[in-house]
Every structure is written in structure tokens, then in C-alpha cells.
Image (cartoon, rainbow, N blue to C red):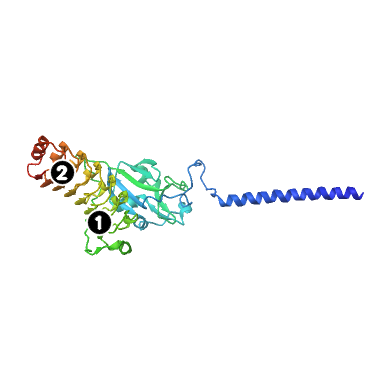
Amino acid sequence: MNTRIERIKIFMGMVVAAFVLLFALAACSEFKLSLGAKPTDVPEGQQGQGPGPGQGDNEPTDHPPIVDVVVDGKTLKSLSFDELKKMGQPLPKNIARFQDQTAVPLAEVFKQVGISKAEKVQFAGSEGEQIEFSWKDVTEDAEKFYLVSRHGPYWKLTRSEGEVNPRSFVLRVLFTINVFTQKDAAGNSPTVAPNPAFTCANTTVYTDYALALANAENICILNLANQGLTEVPPDIYKLKYLTTLYLGHNQLKEVPPVVGVLGNLTTLNLDSNQLTEIPPALGALRKLKQLKLGRNQLTEIPPELGSLQKLEHLELDNNQLTELPPELGNLKSLAELEAENNKLTQLPAEFANLKNLKSAGLGGNNFSEAEKVKIKQMFPNAQVEF
């Protein structure tokens, strides 16, 4: 009898031990799950698209928190996070999900930058993804688009459909708003208001970058020449009022595209560095009058620089250039060109359009005598030196 009771006790002990073991394993699994990514609340029909706005999705670390508004291929405005945040408005009740976030109606963005009508709008995201809507889609009352952000500094694009809560997102991280306008017969875009004139009043020359950054809203001239720099400060985009930037005589090997958002620059000096290429983004500096790229190791010039319609002085001397892009022939304001000591053998025929050219330094290249004659005929009103 005692033996039977002992066997029952052993059996019950084994059952209890098994339950304890199962409970421990389950608890361990929950703990491991808690260390991993939390499940996201993705609306039905959007599985696989990633987390919704403000749910902690990965944000890029190599791109400034700026949204570019581009009209017909030309940057009209580069909006910082703080500039967009100021456009935030109280949300309708049907956007309850985003009540704890900053939200900016897309219509307000268009209003602030001066766009009243267009044909279509294209949005570009952080991973190169693009989505396109008609102008009616993004502005009519039945379907409103919002830029939303919980903590910043990046914006997500979402939309509200009538009285239904908005979709989780349209684009997770928005970089560019491309607007395609309805042009008139002359090819102009009358629906886009011109940017207000910008005048820099502060003539103080800053040479300390930390101090300049602390006065970002009140700095126009920054001189970082001869400071042994090996890279351009990645947050230089915050100095949005800069008109003059000296980065010459350093050890720079590249120029980040973010410099292209400094839309008020009139002078950019990058001479005497170790640059091997120039980012096409510099073609967005539409107010630039003086660009110095001499004494580097450049082997080519991006054709986008042909968009610098106000450029008057261009230095390309002492590089490794074998040719110049024909697009530079569009620089209608160019008065001085310095391209000495390169490996040029000819100039593009399009350079004949440089009607305002007054001087061209072209010595130390590989021009034939016949080509020299041709170049002088190309610039009859300029002083050409070989």
C-alpha cells in the first residue's frame, strides 16, 4: 500500500515539475520577445508596409531633416523641421490617432511657399520610393494630406479620408515634394509666386564653427579656411542664411550634397583642397555669383552647374580636367572663367553662348594652335590668355 502511495507521489511530483518547466519556458520566450521589435499596429490591408507615423521606424542618419519643395525641376524652397513645425495646426477630431503629434496640412505648405495651383504632385521618400497624385487629390476637402511628426526631426506623409481615420502612412520619411505646374504658352509657371527678396544685414565674419552654429539665425559669413578640416560639418545646413562660405585651404576630399540646401549663398570658396568630385547638388545654389574650385584634383565638373544662372566668376584652375560640360554654356552671367593648368584640348561649342564673358584664363592646357584660334573667335569681346 505504502509503495503504491509513494509511486503516486512521484508521479504527481513529475507532473508539477513539467508544468513548472513549461511555465518557465513560456516566460523566457516572452522576455526574449520584449527585447526584440514590438509588433506594430498596421491597419488591415497594409501589412508588410512597416510601422505607422511615430512608431519608431528607422530614420536616415545621412540626410539632413529638410523637406525640399521642387517646382518643375527647380528647388523653390528647402524647409527645415522648425520651419514646418511653425505651420502646424489643430487637427480635426477624425485624426484622433495623431493628437499627440505635430501635424501640418499639405495645403498650408503650398500656401506658405506660394504655390496656388498645379497639375500634379510627386512625393519622394528616404529609400528612393515615389508616389504621385493629381493636384486635386492633394488639395480637395474629401482627402487631406498631412505631414506628421511625433518627436522629429523627420516628417511622414499621411492622409485622411473623409471621416475615416487616416492610413498609417503614405511615405515613412518624406524628403522631397515635386510639384509640376500648369505652364502658360511661354513656358512660365504663373501659379508659383516669386520668393521674397533676401537681404543679409549681418557683416560679422565668423571663424569659429561652434559659435556660428549657436548663432545660426543670425550669421551670413562663415570663414573656415586654413583650419585643417577633413570634412564639411554635416549640420552646416542649419546656417540657412549664409551668403558667404569659405572652406579653402583645408584637407577636404569631398563636399556633401547638403551644401546644396544653402540657397542664399552668393560666394562659395572650396579652393586648395583634395577634392576629386563636386556633387551635382551645388547646381541648386541659384543665387551663387562666385564659385572657386581651383587647386584640387577634379577630373570632371557636373553638368548641373550649368543651372547657376547668376554665376559671374568661376575658378577651375589647377585640376585634372580633360573636358568641360557643354551645359556651362548656359551660364549667361559668367564674366570670368579661370581654367588654367588642366588637360583641356577643346571647349564645347555651347561656350559661344557666354556673351558676357570678359576674361578667360586657359593657359597650361593642351590646346592646339588651331583650337586657340577657334576659342578666340568664340569670345570676341573677352580677353583670352593661353
Horizontally, residue 259 falls left or right of residue 61, namely: left
Q: Position of residue 334 (x, y in %)?
A: 15, 47
- Seen at 54% across and 48% down, the residue is 39
Horizontally, residue 10 falls left or right of residue 156, namely: right
Q: Which mark is residue 364?
A: 2
Q: Which mark is residue 254?
A: none
Nearest the eye: 153 or 91: 153
Nearest the eye: 212 or 78: 212
Label 2 SS? loop
Using a 10 Å C-alpha cutoff, classify the residue at mark 1 as few (fewer than 14 neighbours), some (14 to 19) or many (20 or more): many
- Tell me the distance, in whole angstroms, between the alpha carbons under discs 1 and 2: 29 Å
Give the residue type at disc 2.
Gly
Identify the residue position indicated by label 1 in the image: 245
Horizontally, residue 129 falls left or right of residue 357, namely: right
Nearest the eye: 270 or 181: 270
Q: Residue furthest top?
A: 370
| Labelled pair 1, 2 in contact (Cβ < 8 Å) | no
Q: Position of residue 238 (x, y in %)?
A: 32, 57
**Viewport quadrant of the C terminus:** top left
Horizontally, residue 139 falls left or right of residue 306, namely: right
- Along the polypeptide, which appears first: circle 1 or circle 2? 1
Label 1 SS? strand
Q: Position of residue 98 (x, y in %)?
A: 46, 53
